[in-house]
Amino acid sequence: MSTYVISGGKKLEGVVSVSGSKNASLPILAACVLNNGITKLYNVPNIHDTKVMLDILKYLGCRIKKNRDKIVIDARKIEKYEIPEELMRKMRSSVILAGALIGRFKKATFSCPGGCDIGARPIDLHLKVFENLGINIVKDTGYIQCKCDTIEASKITLDFPSVGATENAILASVFAVGTTTIINAAMEPEIVDLQNFLNKIGAKINGAGTNEITIKGVTNLKDSGYKVMPDRIEAGTLLCAGAITGGNITLKNVIPEHITPVIQKLEECGCSLKIKGDQIMLRSPKKLKAIDIKTMPYPGFPTDMQAIFASILTIAKGTSVIIENIFENRYKYASELGRMGAKFTIEGRTAIIKGVRKLNGANVQATDLRGGAALVLAGLASKGKTRVENIEYILRGYENLDTKLNSIGAKITKEV
Ligand code: EPZ
């Protein structure tokens, strides 16, 4: 496993550009299966998770051409409808391929997906969506087989606004006979990006970004190109990197309204932020103030920013309280931050963080994607050297994070 070696204590200053969104790219890559033709995608981040998704598309029979800025996906020769277990285990989001395969071929076989170690992450809501659409589901020896003669448009009410289940409901009903309605749908910007992409290739979807989405079944789609939205969690991560080092940074290629709750919390901590088009300027205070955070489905504070924001609160003045309402086990990073001097008390879904004057460099291990990013930020703020091991977790979701941070004054080297 590889390691980041961080020499901390430097203020970050300068301008850095945000890459395309991992969590919009993955469902859009899966959605390319629906088009019996050729689709061009731009601004897809070159990260581990998009590579895994492309490997699965190739396994299914897609022909992929990839250069620095563009990915061309030819889905005319798909001849497999089963996602192999080893690829499913590598990444939870592969479950959205099921919706796309069912949408186009009315069948899919897959195993329960893997993913970050942040909780059980069941797929019961996904399966309920498929049943609502008249799809027969057979579970045996760890595999799930889905099959139907026609996909029946229906009214689907989600018990919880699950992002993945909403995406699967959209993907599986693009060619349904009639109009499908999703009630209590997830409202994340990535769902809006998926709708915009699908409508560009000929689908008829409305309402993404609200809690009620309608999908009017069509009979075919067309070739087109699409540019994926910027990554709002990478944007939040880079802003927090500026804040934890007392720096002044500018982000380019962002959609500020995608991270309003993060901007608001950074202002509550004493940062001043200016928004100009697709740029956000952040100036940090001498000392950050402790605040309270509750993670919520969008448009609330994003769970993916919980660990990252916690890292900046470890050196804030006062005591902060975080409540994680989305995943049941998303504090694994806390003990690693404790090795650097952070003061955490974890009680179930609540974390109490007593701000300390400073953190000290230490050897720490990434436990998951966002927890790993939190450790990098803590290393940037610490005097001395921090070694963050198991950075493969971080490489799943951040494109060239070390290069980006070094371009604004950090000192990070990668040991393979
Ligand atoms: C997506 O995961 C994101 N991943 C996650 O980002 C993000 O944290 C999450 O949405 C919430 O915003 C991608 O988009 C690839 P959910 P997803 O279904 O779809 C429970 C990152 O760091 N649930 O909204 O898996 C589930 O256990 C990743 O980039 C069920 O109970 O999230 C969780 O507690 C991490 N049954 C909650 O709902 C189900 O069938 C939210 O899950 C599905 C989900």
Image (tube, helix red, strand yellow):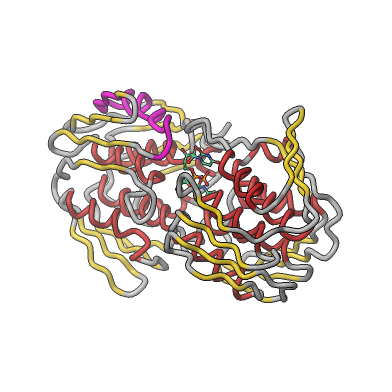
Of residues 62 and 3, the one nearer the viewer is: 62
Quadrant where the N terminus sits is top right
Residue 168 picture location, percent across and down: 61, 53
Quadrant where the C terminus sits is top right
Is 267 drawn above or below residue 17 in the view shown?
A: above
Say how many tags the image has: 0
Residue 205 picture location, percent across and down: 57, 70
Is 99 drawn above or below residue 351 in the view shown?
A: below
Of residues 363 and 373, the one nearer the viewer is: 373
The magenta span reads: 326-346
Of residues 124 and 118, the one nearer the viewer is: 124
Q: Is residue 335 covered in magenta?
A: yes
Residue 93 picture location, percent across and down: 60, 46
Decide if residue 39 is in sight here: yes
Residue at horizontal 46 percent and vertical 58 percent from the top? 231
Q: Quadrant of residue 303?
A: top left
Is 382 drawn above or below residue 136 in the view shown?
A: above
Q: Is residue 93 covered in magenta?
A: no
Taking the image as shown, residue 233 lies to the left or right of residue 77, namely left
Residue at horizontal 38 percent and vertical 54 percent from the top? 298
Residue 66 picture location, percent across and down: 70, 63
Residue at horizontal 61 percent and vertical 58 percent from the top? 154
Q: Quadrant of residue 310?
A: top left
Q: Quadrant of residue 139?
A: top right
